[in-house]
Image (cartoon, rainbow, N blue to C red):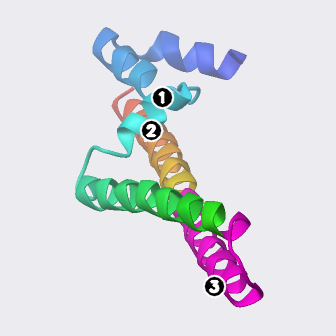
Amino acid sequence: MTDLDQAIRNALSIEDARTFDRLGADQPLHRQLAEMFQGQLAWMNVIVWIAGFALFAVGAYCAWNFFYAADLRAMLQWGGGAWLCFLGLALVKMWAWMEIQKNAVVREIKRVELQVAQLRRG
């Protein structure tokens, strides 16, 4: 913690200090993942995660069949299906990490808003 953070914490009331701590920057990954399923877009994040699991399952099935394909045409079809599924899975993962990053930015903005509100009161 920097000296500035400590000075801000000392200037806050007990209730505001709790809010400041709750909005802390260094949250563990499991808490950041849980935050994805709160708010207005929680339903969309659930759908995206279900699609990610489905893409992984279908991609693994296609990859398995790719290795046991009898001819080149079947290998290309199964390999293409696996490639598309894993590409879609990569997009799902990018979506999830962007959501986590967005929530972290919003949390930091709320911390700054709290600090500005304290400066206006004080």
Asked if residue 38 lies left or right of residue 50, the reply is left
Helix, strand or loop under label 2: helix
Locate residue 15, reporting x and y percent: 28, 15
Q: Is residue 45 above or below residue 120?
A: below
Answer with mark 1 or mark 3, whichever residue precedes in sequence.
Answer: 1
Q: Are marks 3 and 2 in contact (CB under 8 Å)?
A: no
The numbered dot on residue 33 is: 2
Asked if residue 117 lies left or right of residue 75, the reply is left
Label 2 amino acid?
A: Leu
Helix, strand or loop under label 1: helix
Asked if residue 66 lies left or right of residue 22, the reply is right
Asked if residue 51 lies left or right of residue 62, the reply is left
The number of numbered discs placed on residues in the rendered structure image is 3
Which is more toward the observer, 100 or 95?
A: 95
Q: CA distance from mark 2 to mark 1?
A: 5 Å
Going 35% across and 56% down the picture, which residue do you hit?
A: 50
Going 45% across and 38% down the picture, which residue do you hit?
A: 33
- Give the number of the mark in front: 1 or 3: 3
Which is more toward the observer, 94 or 35?
A: 94
Helix, strand or loop under label 3: helix
Label 3 amino acid?
A: Gln
Q: CA distance from mark 3 to mark 2?
A: 35 Å
Label 2 crowd (10 A; few <14 / some 14-19 / many >=20):
some
Q: CA distance from mark 1 to mark 3?
A: 37 Å
The numbered dot on residue 77 is: 3
Residue interval drawn in magenta: 66-95
In what quadrant of the picture does the C terminus appear? top left
Asked if residue 64 is among those painted magenta in the image, a careful observer would answer no
The numbered dot on residue 30 is: 1
